């Protein structure tokens, strides 16, 4: 059963049941308490809810206690369909989709609203939201999307992509509202341990002040160590010309200031990205609250809006501590991308190497004389387009022993170099060469940045992007499918998803439920493998740790 619903912005909403063909199967009705209506329907029918956007429709329902099992997110689906038709990046809102359908001028999507820290109600009090769309608008766009879904090159796979994307959106809202367990006292203690005491006047903490003085002494002049331009000029005056102040560059510099700058960079990043101000803004009531954005990166991976949730440094993970009597079940899909390549390429020998265990070690034994490092260089070079230096002999061995895998990524690269579009396993389409993807539009500190070259960039750079896109995007599909399965089975336990990062999942659960939760995670990974790839010998093993503190996960 399907139910189309348009929230009215006052806690109610307009609803109508849809037939198997996606058309109204009865009279429309208005629910004055939409959360109660949804909860009752979930208990009775467990329908698939069709609504404009999960990011706006689901949060108020979840806060009111109405958990949704399945949905069709019109906005996310529109983005996928636009990409498949070669119109990546065009407006994707319900209003834009309806305007295209009816031949009217297409309005731009509204700008992303700024992140709202927990407890800040000003945005809600003075929110000037547009009037909700009509239910008929939603029905018409949904019917059009169903027709367009049937017209894509592989509708079966693409339908799974749409379902996984919509399920991921549900999981994102649930993770955001659950919050990640966070001990503010532990966080403060580690900041004092690493940075020294905070400044009482708002300046840098003691350790950064001391390092600034030592760097000045090393150069014989005072500079701002956080300024790359000033650092480069200081080195130039010392007779050392550097291309940048990146860490790998500084590690090669024979100058007393270099190790001090490396330490300063690391601590300065901690202070600015996860220091006391960050903790005061984003950690409340024992939880770190983040807003996740599924499909926020061109590969389909998640981003976040505010808080930098996808880039929590390992040292800061010491503050992620389960509640008393609870534990964290941390699951990490090791070597995910090489296994994805084995599955999508159909390379029999590479698939056998990916049947379990350490894939790089298996490759080394098979084709690289036991040299694991060389095997890793070859496989990563094939996926990321590294063709020079130490990669040359390794790639030659890869071409010889795993020709189907090599041909798969080479075909994607050639397509990109000639300006063509490539697709993931389920059908997510890459953006055209003229498009510049900016994850920073969502949150400059978040997300994985897939390198999309700007218009006019070299064809080879474009080929490197498309070569990697077919792997990265498929890995994102596998992860979303795992999440879709896991969130369904977790409700049979006392566990809840509290964090997700590319190929890593955290579940917070009662200590006595840890074994069941771990089994649920393994089961979800297996279901994702079968749903995407069917009868493949490739396995996607998960490293699962049951810990009280995130940093202790192996």
Image (spheres, rainbow, N blue to C red):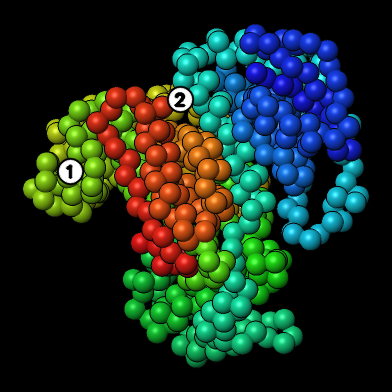
Q: In this view, does 483 lie above or below 343?
A: below
- State how far apart marks 2 and 1 are (Cα): 27 Å
Classify the position of the C terminus by image quarter: bottom left
Q: Which of 488 and 480 is in front in this view?
A: 488
Residue 312 percent coordinates (x, y): 53, 62
- Whichever of labels 2 and 1 marks the residue nearer the N terminus, that label is 1
Q: Total number of numbered labels?
A: 2
**In which quarter of the view is residue 445 placed?**
bottom right
The numbered dot on residue 426 is: 2
Circles 2, 1 touching at the beta carbon (< 8 Å): no
**In which quarter of the view is residue 19 placed?**
top right
Q: Nearer the viewer, residue 255 or 523?
A: 523
Q: Is residue 258 above or below residue 451?
A: below
At 87% from the left and 25% from the top, the residue drawn is: 30
- Whether residue 236 can be seen here: no
Residue 466 percent coordinates (x, y): 42, 32
At 61% from the left and 30% from the top, the residue drawn is: 70
- Whether residue 204 can be seen here: yes
The numbered dot on residue 424 is: none
Residue furthest to the left in view is 369
* Residue named by callout 1: 363
Classify the position of the N terminus by image quarter: top right
Q: In this view, does 291 lie to the left or right of 354?
A: right
């Amino acid at each position: 059963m399907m139910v189309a619903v348009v929230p009215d912005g006052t806690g109610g909403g307009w609803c109508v049941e849809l037939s198997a063909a996606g058309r109204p199967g009865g009279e429309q009705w208005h629910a004055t308490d939409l959360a109660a209506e949804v909860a009752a329907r979930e208990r009775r029918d467990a329908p698939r809810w069709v609504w404009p956007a999960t990011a706006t429709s689901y949060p108020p329902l979840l806060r009111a206690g109405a958990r949704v099992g399945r949905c069709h997110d019109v906005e996310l689906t529109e983005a996928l369909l636009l990409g498949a038709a070669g119109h990546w990046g065009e407006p994707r809102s319900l209003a834009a989709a309806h305007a295209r359908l009816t031949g009217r001028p297409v309005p731009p999507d509204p700008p992303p609203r700024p992140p709202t820290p927990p407890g800040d109600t000003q945005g809600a009090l003075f929110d000037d939201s547009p009037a909700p769309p009509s239910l008929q608008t939603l029905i018409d766009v949904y019917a059009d999307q169903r027709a367009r879904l049937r017209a894509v090159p592989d509708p079966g796979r693409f339908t799974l992509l749409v379902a996984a994307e919509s399920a991921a959106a549900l999981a994102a809202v649930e993770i955001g509202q659950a919050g990640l367990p966070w001990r503010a006292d532990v966080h403060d203690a580690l900041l004092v341990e690493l940075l020294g005491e905070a400044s009482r006047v708002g300046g840098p903490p003691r350790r950064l002040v001391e390092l600034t003085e030592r760097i000045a002494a090393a150069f014989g002049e005072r500079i701002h160590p956080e300024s790359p331009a000033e650092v480069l000029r200081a080195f130039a005056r010392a007779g050392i010309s550097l291309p940048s102040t990146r860490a790998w560059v500084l590690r090669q510099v024979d100058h007393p200031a270099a190790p001090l700058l490396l330490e300063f960079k690391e601590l300065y990043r901690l202070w600015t990205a996860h220091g006391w101000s960050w903790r005061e803004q984003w950690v409340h009531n024992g939880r770190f609250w983040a807003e996740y954005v599924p499909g926020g990166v061109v590969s389909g991976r998640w981003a976040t809006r505010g808080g930098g949730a996808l880039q929590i440094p390992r040292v800061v993970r010491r503050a992620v501590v389960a509640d008393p009597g609870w534990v964290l079940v941390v699951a990490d899909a090791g070597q995910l991308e090489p296994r994805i390549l084995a599955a999508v390429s159909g390379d029999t020998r590479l698939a056998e190497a990916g049947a379990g265990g350490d894939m790089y070690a298996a490759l080394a034994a098979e084709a690289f004389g036991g040299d694991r490092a060389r095997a890793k260089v070859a496989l990563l070079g094939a996926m990321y387009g590294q063709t020079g230096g130490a990669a040359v002999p390794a790639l030659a061995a890869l071409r010889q022993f795993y020709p189907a895998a090599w041909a798969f990524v080479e075909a994607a690269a050639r397509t990109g170099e000639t300006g063509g579009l490539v697709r993931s396993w389920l059908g997510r389409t890459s953006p055209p060469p003229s498009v510049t993807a900016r994850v920073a539009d969502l949150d400059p500190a978040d997300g994985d940045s897939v390198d999309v070259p700007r218009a006019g960039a070299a064809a080879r750079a474009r080929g490197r992007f498309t070569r990697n896109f077919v792997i990265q995007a498929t890995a994102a599909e596998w992860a979303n499918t795992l999440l879709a399965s896991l969130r369904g089975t977790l409700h049979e336990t006392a566990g809840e998803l509290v964090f997700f990062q590319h190929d890593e999942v955290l579940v917070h659960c009662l200590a006595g439920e840890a074994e069941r939760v771990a089994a649920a995670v393994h089961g979800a990974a297996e279901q994702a493998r079968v749903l995407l790839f069917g009868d493949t010998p490739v396995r996607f093993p998960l490293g699962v740790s049951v810990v009280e503190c995130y940093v202790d996960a192996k």
